[in-house]
């Protein structure tokens, strides 16, 4: 077996973010872990184990030919549906905080929605690459992939997991757009999705409280607005340089679960605006690099796969940061590669492994010369949506 090259940009940025995450998880959780479990390293030890598993999966997948994934695209979709159904199985599914999002695997818990997101991206990349020009047909081209995606989204909403469902819906929309779907079809789909998501908010009192708390968190300072207020206080205390690593105060039983969804607030308090912007820049760099790889793909499936996994990781990162800074309502979305969370960390690294696999396959296949259009990342969207590109990609 010939070993493929590992894209150094994706690998070292991922490694750097995970290493940074280990440090921040320990800083954010050691007092909490000592109080709950009598072991200051309780959370960080679990995080390191999941990170090791994630990197092993990432390196293994990076050596795969992405075209082999097309053969299992439909089985992956079926497996994603079955995994999401398992959370409702008695004795297997685990309920916490009023939601059934976890499956118990011995002493470990597993969140099927994290796997389903990646499986759906692979399936859609395969399906949309096959559709080609037929995607313009509403009944035979556009509706089938949207319908399959709708099943995944519905199962996420039933758990309920509105944050993950919203993120996944955004990824589906981006892939449909890049594949060349008609704007009218996309508009109808976006409108229908918006009505469903709005209904999930309006008819759920606790979600409405979060919306009201988003507009005025201090009006519900002891209720739905508490997390956001503590997050904003942490970021405000950090200022430009931060209080120093380990010197944060809001993590001391003020900010709930600071090592998970609101770890970005701990970053802002201890490392200041400078540290927070560096984290945002790292995700922006991953986004740029991923779309650069997608722009260089001559195979349409690989291009959609690279764009899909890139947007999935980057969008989740920016969504988490927006929640922590009060730009979006509170939702349970972890910060990829940094927050503690085994399923999220492992499948984020698997996504980046897929991106490396696409890049290494394209690198081995092409011999770009000076001025080659394959070296230009700009114009990916317009290039991907041109019918001539789709015809060349399918040939």
Image (spheres, helix red, strand yellow):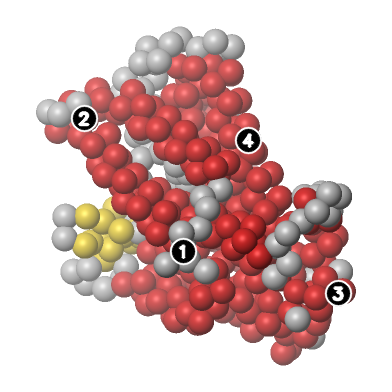
Q: Residue at label 1?
A: 2
Closer to the N terminus: mark 2 or mark 3?
2
Identify the residue at horizontal 70%, vertical 70% (top origin).
299
Report the Cα–Cα distance between label 2 and label 1. Answer: 40 Å
Q: Secondary structure at mark 1?
A: loop
Closer to viewer: mark 4 or mark 1? 1
Closer to the N terminus: mark 1 or mark 3?
1
Identify the residue at horizontal 61%, vertical 25% (top origin).
277
Q: Residue at label 4?
A: 327
Is 41 displayed left or right of 318 in the figure? left
Q: Which mark is residue 233?
A: none
Q: Residue at label 2?
A: 41
Identify the residue at horizontal 24%, vertical 23% (top origin).
31
Report the Cα–Cα distance between label 1 and label 3. Answer: 35 Å
Q: Residue 47 appears in which quarter of the rendering?
A: top left
Binning the other alpha carbons within 10 Å of mark 2 as few (below 14), some (14 to 19) or many (20 upward) gives: some
Rendered location of residue 30, percent (x, y): 25, 25
Say which of 375 and 70 sits in front. Answer: 375
């Amino acid at each position: 077996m010939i070993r493929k090259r590992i894209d150094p940009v994706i690998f070292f940025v991922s490694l750097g973010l995970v290493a940074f995450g280990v440090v921040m998880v320990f800083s954010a959780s050691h007092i909490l872990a000592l109080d709950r479990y009598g072991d200051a390293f309780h959370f960080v030890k679990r995080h390191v184990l999941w990170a090791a598993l994630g990197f092993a999966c990432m390196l293994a997948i990076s050596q795969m030919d992405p075209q082999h994934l097309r053969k299992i695209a439909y089985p992956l979709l079926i497996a994603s549906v079955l995994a999401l159904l398992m959370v409702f199985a008695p004795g297997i599914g685990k309920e916490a905080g009023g939601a059934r999002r976890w499956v118990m695997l011995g002493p470990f818990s597993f969140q099927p929605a994290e796997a389903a997101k990646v499986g759906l991206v692979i399936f859609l990349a395969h399906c949309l690459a096959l559709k080609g020009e037929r995607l313009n047909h509403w009944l035979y081209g556009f509706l089938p992939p949207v319908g399959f995606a709708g099943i995944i989204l519905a199962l996420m909403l039933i758990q309920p997991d509105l944050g993950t469902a919203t993120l996944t819906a955004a990824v589906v929309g981006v892939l449909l757009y890049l594949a060349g779907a008609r704007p009218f079809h996309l508009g109808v789909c976006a409108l229908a999705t918006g009505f469903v998501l709005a209904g999930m908010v309006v008819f759920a009192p606790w979600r409405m409280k979060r919306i009201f708390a988003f507009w005025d968190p201090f009006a519900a300072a002891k209720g739905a607005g508490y997390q956001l207020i503590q997050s904003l206080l942490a970021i405000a205390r950090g200022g430009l340089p931060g209080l120093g690593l380990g010197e944060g105060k809001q993590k001391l039983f003020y900010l709930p679960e600071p090592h998970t969804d609101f770890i970005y607030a701990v970053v802002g308090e201890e490392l200041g605006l400078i540290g927070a912007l560096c984290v945002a820049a790292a995700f922006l760099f991953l986004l740029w690099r991923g779309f650069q790889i997608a722009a260089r793909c001559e195979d349409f499936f690989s291009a959609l796969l690279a764009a899909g996994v890139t947007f999935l990781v980057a969008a989740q990162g920016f969504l988490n940061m927006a929640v922590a800074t009060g730009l979006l309502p509170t939702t349970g979305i972890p910060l990829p590669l940094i927050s503690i969370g085994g399923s999220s960390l492992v499948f984020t690294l698997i996504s980046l492994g897929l991106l490396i696999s696409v890049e290494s396959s394209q690198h081995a296949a092409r011999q770009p010369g000076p001025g080659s259009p394959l070296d230009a990342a700009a114009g990916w969207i317009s290039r991907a949506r041109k019918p001539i590109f789709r015809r060349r990609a399918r040939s």
